Protein backbone atom coordinates (compact mmCIF):
# COMPACT_ATOMS: atom_id res chain seq x y z
CA UNK A 1 0.00 0.00 0.00
CA UNK A 2 1.36 3.39 -0.99
CA UNK A 3 0.65 6.66 0.80
CA UNK A 4 0.24 8.82 -2.30
CA UNK A 5 -2.91 10.40 -0.97
CA UNK A 6 -2.90 13.35 1.41
CA UNK A 7 -4.43 12.71 4.81
CA UNK A 8 -5.03 15.52 7.26
CA UNK A 9 -7.01 16.05 10.42
CA UNK A 10 -8.43 19.50 10.99
CA UNK A 11 -11.12 21.04 13.16
CA UNK A 12 -13.59 23.27 11.37
CA UNK A 13 -16.20 25.62 12.77
CA UNK A 14 -18.62 24.82 9.96
CA UNK A 15 -19.15 22.28 7.20
CA UNK A 16 -18.37 25.00 4.66
CA UNK A 17 -14.72 24.79 5.69
CA UNK A 18 -14.64 21.27 4.30
CA UNK A 19 -14.49 22.77 0.81
CA UNK A 20 -12.07 25.54 1.78
CA UNK A 21 -9.23 23.06 2.24
CA UNK A 22 -9.81 21.75 -1.27
CA UNK A 23 -9.63 25.25 -2.74
CA UNK A 24 -6.35 25.99 -0.96
CA UNK A 25 -4.90 22.77 -2.38
CA UNK A 26 -5.90 23.90 -5.88
CA UNK A 27 -8.25 21.00 -6.48
CA UNK A 28 -10.38 20.98 -9.61
CA UNK A 29 -13.26 19.36 -7.78
CA UNK A 30 -14.24 17.94 -4.43
CA UNK A 31 -16.64 15.42 -2.97
CA UNK A 32 -17.67 15.27 0.68
CA UNK A 33 -19.87 13.13 2.87
CA UNK A 34 -21.13 14.36 6.22
CA UNK A 35 -22.16 12.22 9.16
CA UNK A 36 -23.99 13.85 12.05
CA UNK A 37 -23.16 12.44 15.47
CA UNK A 38 -24.57 13.35 18.86
CA UNK A 39 -22.10 16.16 19.51
CA UNK A 40 -20.01 16.47 16.37
CA UNK A 41 -20.21 16.21 12.60
CA UNK A 42 -17.68 14.12 10.69
CA UNK A 43 -17.04 15.39 7.19
CA UNK A 44 -14.99 13.32 4.74
CA UNK A 45 -13.60 15.32 1.83
CA UNK A 46 -12.23 13.88 -1.39
CA UNK A 47 -9.95 16.16 -3.41
CA UNK A 48 -9.03 15.93 -7.07
CA UNK A 49 -5.80 17.70 -8.14
CA UNK A 50 -6.05 20.13 -11.06
CA UNK A 51 -2.72 19.09 -12.56
CA UNK A 52 -2.80 15.74 -14.33
CA UNK A 53 0.83 15.20 -13.32
CA UNK A 54 -0.24 15.28 -9.68
CA UNK A 55 -2.86 12.62 -10.33
CA UNK A 56 -2.03 9.40 -8.50
CA UNK A 57 -3.69 6.09 -7.84
CA UNK A 58 -5.21 7.47 -4.65
CA UNK A 59 -6.98 10.81 -4.86
CA UNK A 60 -6.01 13.34 -2.21
CA UNK A 61 -8.51 13.56 0.59
CA UNK A 62 -8.85 15.26 3.95
CA UNK A 63 -10.85 14.32 7.01
CA UNK A 64 -12.54 17.08 8.99
CA UNK A 65 -14.16 16.97 12.39
CA UNK A 66 -16.77 19.68 12.67
CA UNK A 67 -18.06 20.54 16.10
CA UNK A 68 -21.68 21.57 16.20
CA UNK A 69 -22.70 23.99 18.92
CA UNK A 70 -26.31 23.58 20.03
Image (cartoon, rainbow, N blue to C red):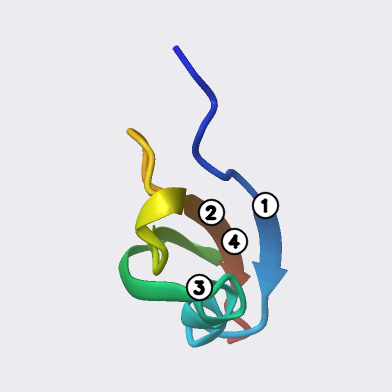
Task: Report whether residue 52 is seen.
Answer: yes
Q: Are marks 2 and 1 in contact (CB under 8 Å)?
A: yes
For mark 2, does the 10 Å Cα neighbourhood hold few (<14), some (14 to 19), or many (20 or more) residues?
A: some
For mark 3, does the 10 Å Cα neighbourhood hold few (<14), some (14 to 19), or many (20 or more) residues?
A: many
The residue indicated by pointer 3 is 22
Looking at marks 3 and 1 on the same chain, the residue that comes earlier in the sequence is marked by: 1
Task: Report whether residue 37 is seen.
Answer: no
Q: Are marks 1 and 4 in contact (CB under 8 Å)?
A: yes
Q: Residue at x 42, y 64 (%)?
A: 51
Looking at marks 2 and 1 on the same chain, the residue that comes earlier in the sequence is marked by: 1
Residue 63 picture location, percent across and down: 53, 54
Q: Residue at x 58, y 70 (%)?
A: 25
Where on the picture, by quarter, is residue 3?
top right
Quadrant where the C terminus is found in the figure? bottom right
Residue 55 picture location, percent across and down: 37, 48
13 relative to 4, above or below: below
The number of numbered discs placed on residues in the rendered structure image is 4
Relative to the observer, which residue lies in front, 68 or 60? 60
Relative to the observer, which residue lies in front, 45 or 25? 25
Q: CA distance from mark 2 to mark 1?
A: 5 Å
Q: CA distance from mark 1 to mark 4?
A: 7 Å
The residue indicated by pointer 4 is 65
Q: Which mark is residue 9?
A: 1
Amino acid sequence: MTSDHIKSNHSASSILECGDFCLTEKCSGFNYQSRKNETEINCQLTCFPTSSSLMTKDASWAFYQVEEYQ
